[in-house]
Amino acid sequence: MSARIDAWLAAACADAERRGLPELKPLLESLARSTIGLRAAEAQLDDRMASASPAADRANPGAATS
């Protein structure tokens, strides 16, 4: 996991423990894994979109083609 998500997960789990809600830990871990997966998918999509479009199209996305 990323350091940022690891830190969030540790804080969220500690908070759940303090509140007497240890059953939340598996849900929080699942949320962390899902967040990582979504971020990875978004980055992969961004990479695909960037490599599929010529630089000129990215610089002027509203230009008409004929």
Image (cartoon, grey):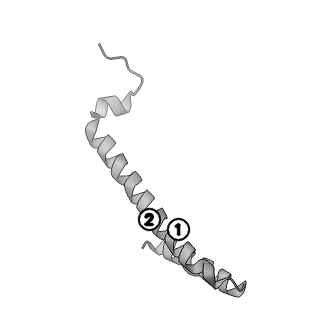
Q: Residue furthest right?
A: 19
* Snapshot quadrant of residue 19: bottom right
Say what secondary structure mark 2 lies in. Answer: helix
Is residue 11 something one can see in this rendering?
Answer: no
For the point 44% across and 65% down, the residue is 36
Callout 2, which amino acid?
Ile
For the point 41% across and 52% down, the residue is 42
Q: Residue furthest front?
A: 23
Q: Earlier in the sequence, mark 1 or mark 2?
A: 1
Relative to 4, 15 lies left or right: right
Q: CA distance from mark 1 to mark 2?
A: 9 Å
Is residue 50 something one can see in this rendering?
Answer: yes
Say what secondary structure mark 1 lies in. Answer: helix
Quadrant that contains the N terminus: bottom left
Q: Which residue position holds label 1?
A: 31
Asked if the residue at tag 2 contacts the one at tag 1, i.e. Cβ–Cβ closer than 8 Å, the answer is no
Residue 64, percent across and down?
Answer: 36, 17
The mark lying in front, picked from 1 and 2, is 1
Callout 1, which amino acid?
Leu
* Snapshot quadrant of residue 28: bottom right
Q: Residues within 10 Å of mark 2 (few under 14, many from 20)?
A: some
Q: Is 53 above or below relative to 15?
A: above
Residue 16, percent across and down?
Answer: 66, 81
Q: Which mark is residue 21?
A: none
Residue 59, percent across and down?
Answer: 37, 32
**How many badges with numbers are in the image?**
2
For the point 38% across and 55% down, the residue is 41
Q: Which mark is residue 36?
A: 2
Q: Nearer the viewer, residue 58 or 34?
A: 34
